[in-house]
């Protein structure tokens, strides 16, 4: 049984719900570990034909990595965090041989936006908000955001979102191609299930090959993800990371010095 996730399997669709609503479903170590286990289940359980990842509560899908776990991490700890997450969860989702769809029910920020982007495609409720606010903390994305955001919305818009930390609403995310469909909050899961039931009616071996080949077409750089992990770690060695994370925890605006 999971401590930080709720799971259910019906009609071949495995729904994985991240369940820390009081912390806006932030990804702490336990969530990453348990998501890794749930993904093993997706890979190995023949009764699972597809999966949905969503967040508990009306407010958040996932509001990012858990910033309280950043305080004690140095450069090495920072890259280790990113490496473990990418290996256990983010690339596991992307390379799953069965469709994995994010149903984004609220804030999808930082690691939350990255989690949604690692999925094969995304649906969103009207309440969804997307952004990569790591620069507010003196950081960069570490779970593939610098790579997958470019793949999904193109270089110029990705540059702007990553550098401004701006949040966008569901309708803009749809215009940009970040999400495929926007549904009313009440029908987000049922409409997402309908899409997956349609896919489950197709030949599973063909679907697995489509996933692998589309991933290959979308991946421009073979070193992008590992370089991101390295650069994420380097940011953890800076004064600006100390200031940025302290400012978040003290609920004030950070003052960066470029050190
Ligand atoms: N890590 C740890 N805790 C987080 C969190 C995160 N990424 N995001 C939210 N929380 C916690 C808050 O600290 C707060 O905890 P508290 O009640 O113990 O004080 C709780 O979740 C509710 O969030 P709060 O900030 O009070 O809600 P809000 O409606 O005022 O603001 C957000 C919502 C999403 C704008 C704001 O929570 C936020 O900016 N979160 C961080 C986003 C981010 O930078 N993510 C990238 C991390 S790399």
Image: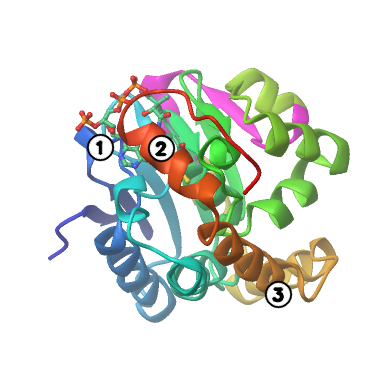
Can you give x and y, in whole percent of width and height, for residue 137 in the image?
A: 51, 40
Q: Are marks 1 and 2 in contact (CB under 8 Å)?
A: yes
Q: Nearer the viewer, mark 3 or mark 2?
A: 2
- Magenta-highlighted residues: 176-194
Left or right: where 129 falls relative to 20: right
Can you give x and y, in whole percent of width and height, for residue 211 in the image?
A: 68, 67
Can you give x and y, in whole percent of width and height, for residue 69 in the image?
A: 31, 55
How far is mark 3 from mark 2, CA to CA? 32 Å
> Any magenta on residue 28?
no
Q: Which residue occupies 70% across, 53% down?
A: 146
Q: Please, what secondary structure does the residue beneath circle 1 have?
A: helix
Residue that label 2 marks = 63
The chosen color scheme is: rainbow
Residue that label 1 marks = 23
Residue that label 3 marks = 209
* The residue at label 2 has a CB less than 8 Å from ligand 1: yes
């Amino acid at each position: 049984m999971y401590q930080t996730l709720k799971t259910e399997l019906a009609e071949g669709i495995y729904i994985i719900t991240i369940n820390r609503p009081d912390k806006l479903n932030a990804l702490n170590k336990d969530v990453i570990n348990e998501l890794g286990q749930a993904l093993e289940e997706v890979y190995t359980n023949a009764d699972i034909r597809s999966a949905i990842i969503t967040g508990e509560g009306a407010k958040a899908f996932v509001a990012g990595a858990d910033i309280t776990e950043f305080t004690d991490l140095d450069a090495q700890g920072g890259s280790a965090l990113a490496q473990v997450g990418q290996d256990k969860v983010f690339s596991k989702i992307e390379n799953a041989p069965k469709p994995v769809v994010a149903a984004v029910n609220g804030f999808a920020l930082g690691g939350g936006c990255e989690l949604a982007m690692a999925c094969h495609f995304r649906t969103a409720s009207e309440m969804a908000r997307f952004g990569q606010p790591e620069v507010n903390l003196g950081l960069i994305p570490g779970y593939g955001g610098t790579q997958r955001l470019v793949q999904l919305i193109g270089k110029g818009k990705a540059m702007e979102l990553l550098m401004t930390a701006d949040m966008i609403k569901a309708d803009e995310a749809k215009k940009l191609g970040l999400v495929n469909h926007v549904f009313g909050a009440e029908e987000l899961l049922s409409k997402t299930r309908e899409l997956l039931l349609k896919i489950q009616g197709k030949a599973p071996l063909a679907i697995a090959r489509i996933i692998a080949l589309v991933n290959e077409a979308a991946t421009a750089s073979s070193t992008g993800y590992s370089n991101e992990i390295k650069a994420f770690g380097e940011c953890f060695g800076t004064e600006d990371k100390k200031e940025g994370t302290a400012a978040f925890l003290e609920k004030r605006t950070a003052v960066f010095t470029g050190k």
